[in-house]
Each structure stands twice: as structure tokens, then as C-alpha cells.
Image: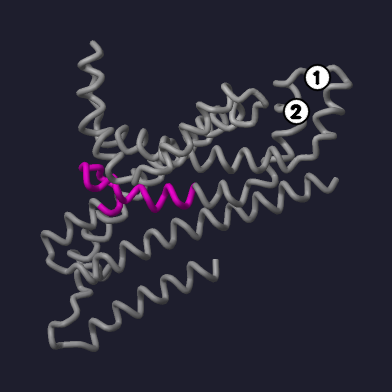
Amino acid sequence: MTRFFKIWVLLGACLFVTACTNDGTWGWYVIDPSTAQGQSNVRFLIGGFWATIQLSLIATVLSMTIGLLVALPGMSSNRWVRLPSRVYIEFVRAIPLLPMLFWVFYGLPVVMRSLGFPITIDAFWGAIITLAISDSAFTAEIYRSGIQSIPKGQTEAARTVGLTYSQTMRYVILPQAIRRILPPLANQFIYIVKMSAFASVIGMQELTRRANELVVTEYRPLEIYTLLILEYLVLVLIISFFVRWLERKMGSDESR
């Protein structure tokens, strides 16, 4: 809570500058909650929170699911089973996020129509698909490193009691691996939250898009983008707080 208090103190200091400057250099009045104009602008900016959170959560769930499905074959002793996983990871990691976003949003519907599937992709789902695919390659590597960090004796012990491969992964290996890879997975979630700003270029009404639209009407980029940064800062701090709480909880469970 102390961190959030400091953030609002900083915002208050910014607004205080308005009263101390009369040369027109600063224009903090555009986000001053004590005025009707400022309240309207702040509400408009904060209105993008839900879209950003919803977009990030869905993309993260899909990324973690795809990443696990890619990581498991990548650890196979069979070269031909392992090869598609490695090709997928290296190919996806090599593509910058913005070109991939443009291809998914503008190019994928064309490809699907040519195959006889007349579908359209709106900005929301175009951003989700792009973020999920882009992040899944990194998530797959996190899963692989976490699973391989578990001693092989755990797998051998599970087999001796009659557990199948899927049961071993579900009940023995993955619960231990998740505890170890939770911090990097949290970093990937934060990465997705920040990269969701790219969705603004295809018209997604999230935080950055709303800030851009407000800049066009108010002509105050410094003040508006300052508030935008604070919004992302608050969002990331909330996520970090929750992840630390989850780490402590899982750590205490593991020690019992």
C-alpha cells in the first residue's frame, strides 16, 4: 500500500506544478481531477484498464497452454518428436511482435478465406492471438527448464508405483516445476501486459489507444503519457504484489 501511496503523491506533485507555473509550458489541467475536464479525461483513460487486463489474462492463459503443449514434445528422446517443437520455438522467437500483429490481423483472414474459411478477426482477438503465440515460445522454454530441473529420481519413483507418463507429469513433476518457474512465468505475464500496448496500432481500445486519442484532442502528450505510465506502473505493481503473495503461499505449502 505504501507504494500506491507514493504513486498518488507523485501524481499530486505533478498537479501541484500546475498551480506554480503560469507560462503555459505545463498543462496538467487536462488530468486534474478537481476540474470537470480533468475528471472526464481521467475517466476516459482509466476506462482502458479493463480491456488491457482482459486482453492480458486471456493471452497469458493461451500462452501457458500452448507453451506446455510445445515444451513436452521438446523433451522427448525421439529426435523427430522433438524437432517440431524446436522449429516452432526458434521460428516464433525470431519474429518481432509488431510485424506478427499486422500479419495476424490483416493477413490471417486472407489466408483463411483462401482455404474456404470466411472468418474475420477483430482487434481484440487479433491482439490475443498474436500475444499468445509470441509469448508461447518463451513460456515453452520456461516449462522445459523447470521440468528438467526436477531430479530424474522423481520420475523413476513414480513409474515404480505404476503411474503413467501423464499421471507422473500431473501429480509429481508439474506441481514441483510450477513452484520453481512461477517467477519467470510472472515476468512473462508482466511482459504481456506491457506488450498489449501494441494492440493500439490496430484499433484496440486499451490504455495506450485511449491515451493516443486523448493526445489528439487535447494536444498535451507530456501530461497524458505521464498518467499512462502511472497507470501501467500501478497495474504492474498490483501483479507483482499478487505474485509475491502466491510465491510465499506456495513456498509455505511446499515446506509442510
Q: Is residue 187 left or right of residue 233?
A: right
- Pinpoint residue 146: horizontal percent, then vertical percent: 67, 42
Q: Callout 1: few (<14), some (14-19), or many (20+) C-alpha neighbours within 10 Å?
A: some
Q: Which residue is mark 2?
A: 171
Please say whether residue 192 is one of the residues in the magenta stretch.
yes
On screen, residue 178 versus residue 57, left or right, reads right
- Tell me the amino acid under the disc marked 1: Leu
Q: Is residue 17 above or below residue 162?
A: below
Residue found at x 37% / y 65%: 230
Q: Is residue 180 magenta?
A: no
Range covered by the magenta-colored residues: 189-208
User: Neighbour class for label 2 at 10 Å: few (<14), some, many (≥20)?
Assistant: few
Q: Position of residue 94 (x, y in %)?
A: 39, 43
Residue on which disc 1 sits = 163
* Quadrant containing the C terminus in the rendered view: top right
Measuring 57% from the left and 22% from the top, which residue is drawn there?
80
The answer for how far apart the CA atoms under marks 2 and 1 are is: 9 Å
Q: The residue under label 2 is which amino acid type? A: Tyr
User: Relative to 212, is 69 above or below?
Assistant: above
**Rendered location of residue 243, percent (x, y):** 59, 52
Question: Pointer 2 and pointer 1: residues touching (CB < 8 Å)?
Answer: yes
Residue 157 drawn above or below residue 201: above
In the rendering, which numbered label is found on residue 194?
A: none
Q: Secondary structure at mark 2?
A: helix
149, 4: nearer the viewer: 149
**Magenta portion: prevailing SS class:** helix
Q: Is residue 87 left or right of residue 114?
A: right
| Quadrant where the image shows the N terminus | bottom right
Depth order, front residue of 154/126? 154
Residue nearest the observer in this picture, 241 or 29: 241
Q: Nearer the viewer, mark 2 or mark 1?
A: 1
At x 55% / y 49%, what residue is drawn? Answer: 186
